Image (cartoon, rainbow, N blue to C red):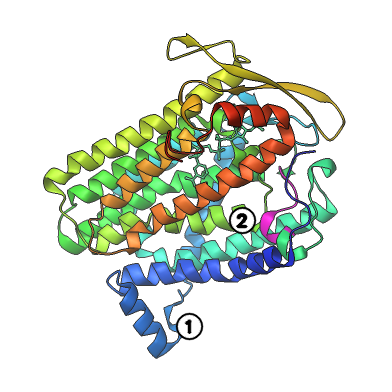
Amino acid sequence: MWGRNETPSAATVFLTGCLLCLCPVLVALCWNCCHYRGASIAALFHHVRSFGILSVLPRPTGESMLMLVSWMALQAVLFVHLPGPLVRGQETPAGNVLEYRVNGLYAWTISNGLFAAFGLLGIIRFSVIADNWEGLLVAANLYGFLLAAFVFIKAHMQPTHRGDRKFSGSRIYDFFMGIEINPRIGSLFDLKLFHNGRPGIAAWTMINASFAASQYNRFGLVTDSMVLINILHALYVLDFFIHEDWYLKTIDISHEHFGFNLSWGDSVWLPYMYTLQAQYLSHNPVILGIQFWPIFLLGLVGYCIFREANFQKDVCRRTGGLCHIWGEPAKIINTKFTSADGKRHNSVLLASGLWGLSRHCNYLGDLILSLAMCLTCGTHHALPYFYILYMTILLMHRIERDHQRCKGKYGPYWTEYCRQVPYKLIPAVY
Ligand code: NDP
């Protein structure tokens, strides 16, 4: 049976406990460094040494609590009531195939349209999100922790699919990594799809726009770097919602269990760390001038590789390999695997196109795009480069985890695929 390792070592549990405590502090440190220490990591450390760690933590406000509650309520209403096709997800290890209503693009359009309309009508300030950023950090943390506790208890008391739970023997590990794969309320309110997409990713473009307004309020201009980061991030966000049905087949939805990693990650890590460049630029304006175009081009190249690779895999899987890739019939490896209920299944692994050049060209494209995003901030400070560092660690780690999982699932077929496509990430290099 493939799936998550069930017995983590003591060292893994210890590391998980550290991440649980340190991640919220790391986000607070980055927020404080960006907004109060001129993005200087040295200045941040000096401040912490002098005044202690508590002095850099954010404080709650009533307005931001209300904003977060209203935002989540709006997203939940849109998630439940907007129309959209019902799409089937990937088969889970226990053999369940779930249906999802795909309406994220409508939700994004309505949410961002309302924000733009209210801003233009003067009902809200465009900078309202940036102005309440500190209080929102507390509210988002509260939400992320409460949600993690809720899904942990739910997994024990009222799981959606008993067979798709993983207990590791460690409560800390289970809390962090999640127990259920697809916890649901009712038959269609999928907590993972909702939280992965709606609170953070739908807000991403609004957060960036708000920090652009904040830059304007502070300096009287919106720089070309701010425009570029808004464009690159919007490209990534729109791609996500336009291809939401594809997203159902990714590791996040198909294989990750829903615990603190995703509940807190979607509520806090994503909106705060993925928008770091716009936050940075709102305080440290960078004029790119002629550099705008090469950075834009790099971002586009990264995006095209990312999209083409994901498209090729998607079309191959949807047609069972009966498709053309770059004008040639797709080269595939026919595989068999067994789910927990003992049933045998057939699948295909694509071994041509970008998937014939390396086993994770989609990650390579993502990393190139991430680098372009960081480059919009110039080279004065290291802080905005945290994103590419994080993405590299995340995706390299994911390559190894995915390799182990696919080896377990496909056995000799996976070995054959690795023989035919020996490079993991960068063709002919790694
Ligand atoms: P993939 O889309 O690469 O999915 C990997 C899975 O695809 C494997 O587990 C296997 O699943 C299947 N697979 C592997 N090789 C092949 C093949 N040759 N042919 C057909 N199927 C294959 O990974 P992710 O879900 O991690 O990433 C999806 C996208 O999301 C990527 O572009 C990535 O860059 C991006 N991403 C972005 C993140 C962010 O925070 N911005 C985080 C993570 C990902 P199975 O066979 O079981 O179906």
Residue at image x 59%, y 29%? Answer: 419
Q: Give the range drawn in magenta.
A: 174-182
Per the image, is 157 magenta? no
Query: Which of the pair 55/373 is nearer the observer?
Result: 373
Residue at image x 62%, y 30%? Answer: 101
Query: Which of the pair 101/296 is nearer the observer?
Result: 296
* Name of the residue lying farthest toward the bottom: 50
* Name of the residue lying farthest toward the left: 290
| SS category of the residue bearing label 1 | helix
Query: Which of the pair 144/269 is nearer the observer?
Result: 269
> Which dot marks residue 261?
2
- Going by the image, does 168 lie left or right of 69? right
Type of amino acid under label 1: Leu
Using the image, determine if residue 354 lies above or below residue 32.
Answer: above
Mark 1 and mark 2 lie on one chain; the one further toward the N terminus is 1
Q: State the residue position of label 1.
A: 54
Type of amino acid under label 2: Asn
Q: How far apart are marks 1 and 2 (CA)?
A: 24 Å
> How far across and how far down the image is residue 68, in percent?
51, 58
